[in-house]
């Protein structure tokens, strides 16, 4: 075992990142979550080569990473997609988290004596609270890497839940740590309730306000070096989290809502910003999972009490707690089928967030905090291995999956251009009046700019003969009229390009 010094830190870091990326490629090929492999690389290196025990540094890295992951998740979420599922998403992210914590805590409290463990209900509730939220990093990466469409608006529902339920779990964890920690002031129930609502209100309000402020600043600052827009937005992300936390709000909720606001407004250099945050998000995810893998003591995971409690709790969460919570929370929303509810129950992945939250009891010197940390780590491994590897398979089994068509055109329009770009695929009904471009009636101020046929691109003319399967890049100043024409032509699959 070696300790990381300043002389070899960069070398070790470079090697770890390289190995993690290769592991991610292997994971994608075999259908496993890449994040599970990142975690595995960290565990292997930590067990055999590197000695790393800094809980404080791990928590700091996790905080930075979660800020970026939540902001990027919000930025990539279209409000038009989550609008129909806001109500069930919010219920799952709040009531669902609390229910999960209560159900799992009751289970842990009841089985602990059978395992020879003394776990008071408050401590069981703390353990459950750290694991009560689904992990946005895991859900975002798996759903988007698979490029698999889900029926009944399930994808935006899952992304909304996983992106917005961390604040609730964080609040429960912090409150319970303050109650159980011998080094912190004990917080009364009344003060805890006040703190809970203050954090939610300030987090939501400041997140929306800072998001609008970020849009205003970026669109008006007029930087000559376009790369600096990414630096500026990164600074605003950290400001959203830290300022909200400073004044007593929930920084994680604020940073997610800031991303949601920024991502749903026109921005100068939006393409540059999207590319930067996509790559940076992957970087912080890799670093976070590697660090968590380095931190854990693998030998402690094999202890009988950790194995027994971790395996039983993991199985209970997957098979009982999550399904019960989902079916109760989604009961008022009749439009979701039983298959959809079952799928949401299954895709309740745990990931880095529960492990990071489990470091709070350790730093707070809560009794049996190391046991809690190891159990949470083991439950996370079980969740990623069992649920993470079956995200696509379960969707296919339940008949909820469909092939998501990717765009054939990669286009970036200036934000001042008001025209609308759409991509459509030529079908037989479009060609009923004739097979040439001039025989397809389009609104005025509408132009077919390019055709993609079998991977080759060309600019069409009026006498260009179109074939079924051709993809057309269409620009128009008459958006509503164009949509009406698409409907008349029997075109249902329209991709809007930004």
Image: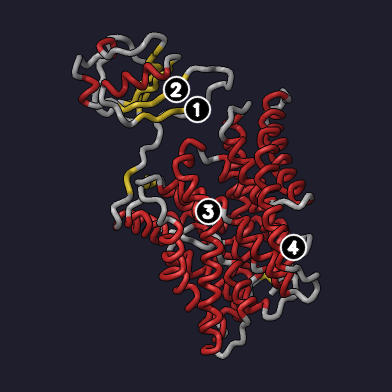
Numbered badge on residue 15: none
Q: Quadrant of residue 260?
A: top right
Q: Quadrant of residue 356?
A: bottom right
Q: Label 2, on which residue?
A: 421
Q: Do the residues labelled 4 and 2 touch (CB within 8 Å)?
A: no
Label 4 or label 3, whichever comes before in sequence order: 3
Q: Distance between the residues labelled 1 and 2?
A: 7 Å
Q: How far apart are marks 4 and 3 (CA)?
A: 27 Å
Numbered badge on residue 162: 3
Horizontal relation, residue 492 to residue 109: left or right: left
* The N terminus - image quarter: bottom right
Label 1 or label 2, whichever comes before in sequence order: 2
Label 4 or label 2, whichever comes before in sequence order: 4
Q: Label 1, on which residue?
A: 498
Numbered badge on residue 191: 4
In this orientation, does residue 494 appear? Answer: yes
User: Considering only vertical position in the picture, is 215 above or below 57?
Assistant: above
Label 1 or label 4, whichever comes before in sequence order: 4
For mark 3, give the secondary structure: helix
User: Considering only vertical position in the picture, is 58 above or below 461?
Assistant: below
């Amino acid at each position: 075992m070696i300790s990381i010094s300043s002389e070899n830190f960069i070398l070790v870091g470079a090697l770890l990142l390289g190995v993690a990326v290769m592991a991610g490629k292997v994971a994608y090929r075999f259908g496993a979550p890449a994040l599970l492999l990142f975690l595995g690389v960290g565990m292997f290196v930590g067990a055999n080569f590197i000695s790393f025990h800094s809980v404080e540094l791990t928590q700091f890295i996790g905080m930075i990473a979660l800020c970026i992951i939540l902001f990027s998740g919000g930025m990539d979420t279209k409000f038009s997609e989550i609008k129909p599922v806001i109500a069930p998403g919010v219920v799952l992210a709040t009531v669902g988290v609390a229910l999960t914590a209560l159900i799992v805590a009751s289970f842990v409290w009841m089985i602990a004596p059978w395992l020879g463990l003394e776990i008071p209900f408050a401590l069981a509730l703390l353990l459950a609270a750290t694991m009560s939220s689904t992990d946005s990093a895991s859900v975002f990466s798996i759903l988007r890497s698979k490029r698999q469409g889900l029926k009944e608006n399930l994808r935006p529902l899952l992304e909304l839940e996983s992106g917005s339920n961390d604040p609730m779990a964080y609040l429960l964890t912090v409150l319970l740590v303050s109650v159980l920690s011998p080094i912190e002031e004990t917080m009364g129930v009344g003060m805890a309730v006040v703190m809970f609502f203050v954090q939610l209100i300030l987090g939501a309000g400041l997140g929306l306000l800072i998001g609008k402020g970020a849009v205003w600043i970026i669109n008006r600052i007029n930087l000559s070096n376009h790369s600096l827009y990414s630096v500026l937005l990164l600074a605003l992300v950290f400001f959203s989290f830290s300022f909200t936390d400073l004044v007593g709000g929930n920084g994680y909720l604020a940073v997610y809502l800031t991303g949601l606001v920024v991502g749903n407004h026109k921005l100068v250099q939006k393409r540059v910003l999207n590319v930067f945050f996509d790559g940076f998000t992957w970087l912080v995810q890799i670093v976070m999972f590697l660090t968590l893998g380095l931190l854990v003591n693998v030998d402690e995971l094999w202890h009988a009490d950790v194995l027994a409690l971790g395996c039983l709790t993991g199985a209970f969460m997957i098979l009982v707690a999550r399904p019960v919570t989902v079916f109760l929370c989604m009961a008022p929303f009749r439009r979701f089928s039983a298959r959809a509810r079952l799928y949401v129950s299954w895709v309740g992945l745990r990931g880095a967030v529960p492990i990071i939250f489990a470091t709070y009891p350790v730093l707070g010197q809560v009794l049996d905090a190391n046991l809690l940390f190891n159990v949470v780590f083991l439950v996370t491994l079980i969740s990623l291995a069992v649920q993470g590897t079956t995200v696509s398979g379960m969707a296919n089994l339940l008949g909820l999956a469909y092939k998501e068509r990717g765009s054939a055109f990669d286009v970036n329009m200036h934000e001042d251009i008001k025209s609308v770009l759409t991509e459509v695929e030529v079908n037989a009904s479009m060609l009923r009046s004739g097979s040439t471009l001039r025989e397809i009636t389009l609104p005025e101020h509408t132009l077919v700019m390019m055709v993609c046929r079998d991977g080759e691109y060309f600019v069409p003319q009026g006498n260009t003969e179109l074939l079924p399967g051709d993809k057309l890049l269409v620009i128009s100043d008459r958006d509503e009229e164009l949509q009406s024409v698409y409907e008349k032509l029997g075109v249902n699959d329209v991709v809007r390009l930004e």
